[in-house]
Structures are given as C-alpha cells and as structure tokens.
Amino acid sequence: MQTLGQTAHFNIQYDETLLGPDGNPNAISRAQRVLGVCEPEFGLLASWYKITDGFGPDNRITVQIIADFAAGGASNNGYKGSNTVIKIGNQTANANAIAAGQSSCMSFVAELVEVFASYRNQHGNGAWNASKSDGEGLSLLCARERFGTGYSLFFGTPWVNSWLQSSRDTQWINASENTDKNPLSFGLSLLFLYYLKNQLNHSIPDIIAAGGDSLAQTYQNLTGKNDATAAFSQLINKYFRPGSTPQLTTENPFPLLEGLRRDVKLSLDSEPEGKPFRVNEGLALTSPFFTCPKDLYKWFVDSAPKKVTCVATVRGFGLPIYRWRINGVDLNPPAQLGQPNVQGSITVQATVTTDHAAQPSTSVLQDILVNYGVGEDDFSSNLVFDLPGVVGHVDLSIEASASERFASSDVSWAAQSITIDNETLYWEPRYYVDRERCMKPFLDVASRYVRSDPFFSLVKTLPDPPQEYTRVIRELTQASAQIVTLAQHAPDQARELRYAMSSALGIALTVLDELGKANIRSAAVPHEVQET
C-alpha cells in the first residue's frame, strides 16, 4: 500500500498493484481525486454534524483505495481515533478514470458520514447509527447530494424503487431496521429523508441535528407532529399509486405540489442539420448605408436546414404526462406514459419570411410539415423536430403542458416563440466595405451628441434589421389585427386587451390600432400587388 499524501485530517493510500484494462496502475488516479476533495468535504460534513473535535493531526483518518469489494463499494471501521480507516473499492475494470474518480469521491462522503455518526454515537447521541436503515439512508443522501454524478454512475437504478415497487411496508418509519443491508428499509429511509428535505423544506444540518431513534421521532422533532407515517404515506400513494408506479430515475421525486405552485419551464435551441446550399442570387441597386450612393451589388441567399430541440422541465409533479403543441396543433401521436419515445409528423400554419434583396420582408402564411420525435424521463420531456423542404424564416409558437397521472387533472403549461432561420441573405464583400466606409463618418459625428447604445445598435443594422426585430414587428402586427377583428364581435373584451397590451409593452393605443388596420388592409391586397 503506497501513501499518496497527507492532509490535516487524512492519510490517503492506494494499492499500486491494481491494474486497469490497459495494464497500467489506476488506483492512484482514484486516490488523487479523493485527495483533492477530502478536506473541503470534511469541513462541510463536520459542520453538518456540528463536530469540532476528535479529528486532526493526532487522529487522522486513513483512506485506502483497495481491490474491489465483493458486496459493496466501500466500508469503514467506525470512529477509532487515529486508527479510523475508510476503504474504497478501486473499480479496477472501469476504464473511465473521470467516472471512477467521481464514484470514489461519492463513496468517500458516504463512509465519512458514517464515521461522523459513529463519533457522535460514542459521545452520547445514538441517532443515525450506520448499522441501521435510517443511518444508511442518511449516508446515501449525503453522498448523492455531494457527488450526484458519481452516485448515479455507481448505483444505477435508484434505491427508492425497491420500496416503491414493493408492498410498501412502513414499519421502518417508526422503528429503524437493525441492518444496513436491506434495500427495502434503507430505500424507504432515503425516500423519507428526501421528503423531510424537499417536501417539508428542512436542511440536511437540521435533519441531522433533529435525529431521533427513528425516522418518526426525527419527523416529530422537526415538525412537532406525530403523524409521520400517515402524512408520508398519504402523499406518496396519492402521486405514486401502489402497483402502478413505474421505475423512477431519481431518488428524490419531491416536492409534490398542486395548482399554481407547480411549474413548467421551456427552453428552445436550434442548430444546423446539414450543409448550406444556394437557393437564390442576383443583382440589386441599393445603398449599403443611408449616406451611401446607390450601386449595383451581388446578393446571395443560402439555406441551412435546422433541427430544433425543445426541453420542458417540471417542478412539483410526481408522474407528469406531457403534451406538446406547435402553432396550436397537438402532436399526433402524442407522447404516452409507458411509451415515452414516439415519432410522428403534423402540418401547421406558420408565417414564413423569405429573403430577397429587393423585397427583404416578403412574408406569407403557409402550411408546413413538421417531423418530430419526443423522449421523456421523470422530470423532463424533449421534443426534437425539423421542417423538411422549408426555406425561409419560420415563426413558430411552442407550447408544453404537464398534468399528473394520478394526483389531479390540473394542467400547467409554458409557451415560447421562436423563429427558425433556415436561410441567410448576404452580399458580395464590396457591399460591406462600402457600408463601413459610409457608416464611419456618420457614427463619428453621432457619437458627439448621442449617448444611447440602442441607437447605435439599430443604426448599424440598417438597411437590413435583424430577423428577431422583424419577427416581433410581424407578431405584434398580427396580434393587433386580431384585436381589431375581436372588437367587431366583443368590443368590451377587445378594449381590455388593447389596454393590457399597451400597458405591458409601453406602446401607444393609436400605434396598436394602426398596426392592426395596416395588417388587415395588406391582407386584402392580392399578393402580386404587394410585391409590386
């Protein structure tokens, strides 16, 4: 056994004879990872346990990276002063040094928590005995909280499933089982501790400090109530019906909330799905900047199809059922519980704006095909789609909703707008050289009198405003037109909506009215005339 290093509280050792799949020693890399985190973790965990003595230069803990255990990843001999030893299995066959290092750190935390519990047990506090189910549950919780990735890599399937998939015996809430080897009892303990932490909002240090001779006693010490089993079981069985609960991918399904306390968040991202290709080109008589004389310039339009990834995440749900809509059209087929990975296609109406040097804002409402796939886990749903054959800038509204499988029929949702830019208009290099030449003297003068960053940002985009500006203008125009239409049938509701939009956006009512009327007038003009 080789000594890698010594710190204020630890001696770190490793077995140099352990060889990885490549034939080289790999225990040293696990030991190096533990050496790097041991002191920070000691400081944090000791503060959770409120331990201020018993450890130090005269009572260092020896941590050894050894051959793999037959029945586990690590062990400790309890608190023995200067003879305290933590042994961590090397994961010798694991060729991923980073993953093995994360799991080693996770095991280190789990064993150090039990050493601290042993120290407190020897000083008159019998809570969190490492040889009982509640102590094992606390050890696992701390390990997962500190090194969640290493925890997941090492254990795989969450331990709470062992209890959730069983007949759900709750006897170990009122009396901890005298073993740390039964997944049913310590799986229940882990789930109950997360109930205390994330459902009832008690911190880990407070949970440790309130530790009693059972989980029920700990609950009573924290809440002042004596209904631990009933309160916990009622909540769990409401959201995770016995006999109908699938395997969870997390140890911590909390908090479980209702109504407006639940939350759905949506993120959207688009990225190129193929190489750009030329779709149009030509010559245009134009001015690169309003102070430049007009000239003939070559222009080009390239298209690069995009793949869009939408991720809906939820908070407060137990077994969420997700639904997606694109421009008001439901996916068909939708994702189904028990069959979370589905593929399909829908046709939606969307505004598509095409780039053209002479007509930079040519927009039409058209049917577009959307090919999609949906995948899900406990707390998120991923929608990935593309728009085959569509060239232009496509305005889409994405909606994601979630409801409970068992607990209630309430629906929570989120929505975002996005423009899928499947094409790009650009000019020959001479155009940009002339623009910079004309722009510089103007900006030099303007900088003496104008101190507004938005002003300069807008000026620099002329004569081609960014797509997000034009999309917002289009959407605002269309919304205003809908208000004008609504006013013909429900004037009171239209008036309230006008005031709400005007107040929220800081836009004068007359401007909204004119935008709406202009949109209606343009819609009545034949498309050929608009282009002319």
Image: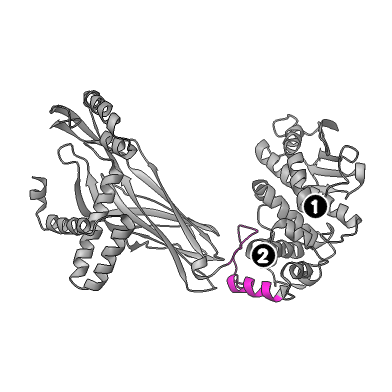
Work out whether residue 205 or residue 421 is closer to the camera in this orientation and state it: 205
* The magenta segment: 230-256
Question: Which quadrant of the structure image shows residue 326?
Answer: bottom left
Label at residue 111: none
Question: Which quadrant of the structure image shows residue 266?
Answer: bottom left
Determine the main secondary structure of the stretch shown in magenta: loop
Quarter that holds the C terminus: top left
Whether residues under marks 1 and 2 lie with C-beta atoms below 8 angstroms apart, the answer is no
Is-magenta flag for residue 248?
Answer: yes
Report the amino acid beneath label 1.
Lys
Asked which colour scheme the image uses, the reply is one colour
Mark whose residue sits in front, 1 or 2? 1
What residue is drawn where x is 79% and y is 34%? 18
Residue 93 image offset from top left, x and y in percent: 72, 39
The secondary element bearing badge 1 is classed as loop
Residue 305 image offset from top left, x and y in percent: 32, 42
Report the amino acid beneath label 2.
Tyr
Label at residue 195: 2
Label at residue 50: 1
Q: From this viewpoint, is residue 441 visible?
A: yes
Residue sticking out furthest to the front? 449
Query: Which numbered disc, 1 or 2, marks the residue that appears first in the sequence?
Result: 1
